[in-house]
């Protein structure tokens, strides 16, 4: 399954997420994902694992006889944030950042380069101008943003610049963002959903995997009669597969992350069942509002 981005670029809808996988562990995980059939890998400057991701891509291409065009690779600019005491990327340091990411990944270009979040405020537009330039230079085939709300994209529109090809945002039954997703569709901006598995009781439970998930949400995921457990039983799949399939049926690309061979396989096996219309309607009523994947709250709300 592919999503067609602007300029007719094909992006596989099932991608492999690598957040919270260390540079050492990421190599076997990404290699396993490639062996399973994933052809879209998502990393970021901020994940500190581009080096291992790159090694796995090169090993996987050799082992599986793939060419560079067969694997869709995304990385992200960490924009910096004055409010957190971090230097903010300028036009030039944005260009330098992608060059550094390409060197880490040992690639000549990425398929998609994203601004990780709208944290920069004053420099948001110059960062975007740099991404437009990087696409012209052939260093990124497609460019986009992540965690941007409609006001941030309106800023780009007002500056008369090309709009993003993609917005990567937290989307799952508990954070459905109907206004933002309809704005993105109206502006031909493709949607990549992240943290699809938030409603699971197993989602990011290891120490140091902070999020803004509430106690109430943690308990809801544990209930024996939770709606996702019931649907999983009905379709003969796992709860994770129901949540991921929901994303695909909404037309979003998805990025399940796992450091476990069985779950890497399971998260890729999504095409043998379909959530029926009644269950899709029932899920629409489960929206709880803002995302929880960032421990500081929903970055689409940053002004
Ligand atoms: N742009 C952004 O700001 C942003 C933010 C967050 C995420 N992302 C991207 O999206 C990707 C996915 O998001 P995420 O990492 O937050 O979470 P996720 O993929 O929704 O969930 C991962 C968590 O669920 C567990 N899990 C995975 N498959 C499972 C299964 N089949 N059954 C039960 N548990 C399962 C994983 O544990 P195990 O590893 O032990 O399986 C891990 O704790 C990231 O890796 C990253 O690439 C982007």
Image (cartoon, rainbow, N blue to C red):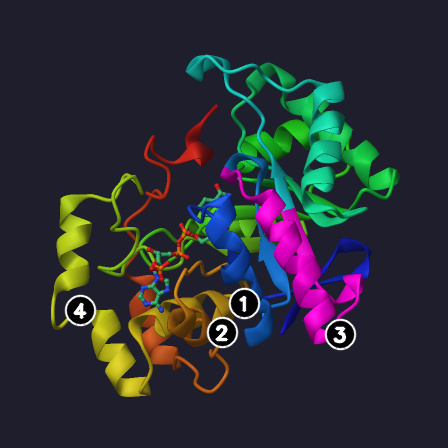
First in sequence: mark 4 or mark 2? 4
Position above or below: 149 against 84? below
Task: Characterize the local packing of mark 1: few (<14), some (14-19) or many (20 or more) Cα atoms within 10 angstroms.
Answer: many
Q: Quadrant of residue 291?
A: top left
Foreground: disc 4 or disc 3: 3
Q: Residue at x 19, y 51 (%)?
A: 217
**Which residue is identified by label 2?**
268
* Residue 88: quadrant of the picture: top right
Image location (x, y in percent) of residue 17: 50, 55
| Circle nearer the viewer, 4 or 1 | 1
Query: What's the CA distance linking mark 4 and mark 2?
Result: 23 Å
Sooner in the amino-acid sequence: mark 1 or mark 3: 1
Per the image, is 57 magenta?
Answer: yes
- Residue name at image x 55 percent, y 54 percent: 192
The reply to whether discs 1 and 2 touch (Cβ–Cβ < 8 Å) is: yes
- Marked residue nearer the N-terminal end (1 or 2): 1
**Does residue 97 lie above or below 186 as drawn?**
above
Q: In this view of the protein, which residue sits in the foreground, 19 or 200? A: 19
Instruction: Find out if the beta carbon at label 1 lies less than 8 Å from the nearest ligand 1 atom.
Output: no
Magenta span: 47-74
Question: In the figure, is residue 89 to the left or right of 241?
Answer: right
Q: Nearer the viewer, mark 1 or mark 2?
A: 1
According to the picture, the residue beneath numbered tag 3 turns out to be: 65
Q: Residue at x 76, y 20 (%)?
A: 92
Residue for badge 1? 33
Residue 226: mark:
4
């Amino acid at each position: 399954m592919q999503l067609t981005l602007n300029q007719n670029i094909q992006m596989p809808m099932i991608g492999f997420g690598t957040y919270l996988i260390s540079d050492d562990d990421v190599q076997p995980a990404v290699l396993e994902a490639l062996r399973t059939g994933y052809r879209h890998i998502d990393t970021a400057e901020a994940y500190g694992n581009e080096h291992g991701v790159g090694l796995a891509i090169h090993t996987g291409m050799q082992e599986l006889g793939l060419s560079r065009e067969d694997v869709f690779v995304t990385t992200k600019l960490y924009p910096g944030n004055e409010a957190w005491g971090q230097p903010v990327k300028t036009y030039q340091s944005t260009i330098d950042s992608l060059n550094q990411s390409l060197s880490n990944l040992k690639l000549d270009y990425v398929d998609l380069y994203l601004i990780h979040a709208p944290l920069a405020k004053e420099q948001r537009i110059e960062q975007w101008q740099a991404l437009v330039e990087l696409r012209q230079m052939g260093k990124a085939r497609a460019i986009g943003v992540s965690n941007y709300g409609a006001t941030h994209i309106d800023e780009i529109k007002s500056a008369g610049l090309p709009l993003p090809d993609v917005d990567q945002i937290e989307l799952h039954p508990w954070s459905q963002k109907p206004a933002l997703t309809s704005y993105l569709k109206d502006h031909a901006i493709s949607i990549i959903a992240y943290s699809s598995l938030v409603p699971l009781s197993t989602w990011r439970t290891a120490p140091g995997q902070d999020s803004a998930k509430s106690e109430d949400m943690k308990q809801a995921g544990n209930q024996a009669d939770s709606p996702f457990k019931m649907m999983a039983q009905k379709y003969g799949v796992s709860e994770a597969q129901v949540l991921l399939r929901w994303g695909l049926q909404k037309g979003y690309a998805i990025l399940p992350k796992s450091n476990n061979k069985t779950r890497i396989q399971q998260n890729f096996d999504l095409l043998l069942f379909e959530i029926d219309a009644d269950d899709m309607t029932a899920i629409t009523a489960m929206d709880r509002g803002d995302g929880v994947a960032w421990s500081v709250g929903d970055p689409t709300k940053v002004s």
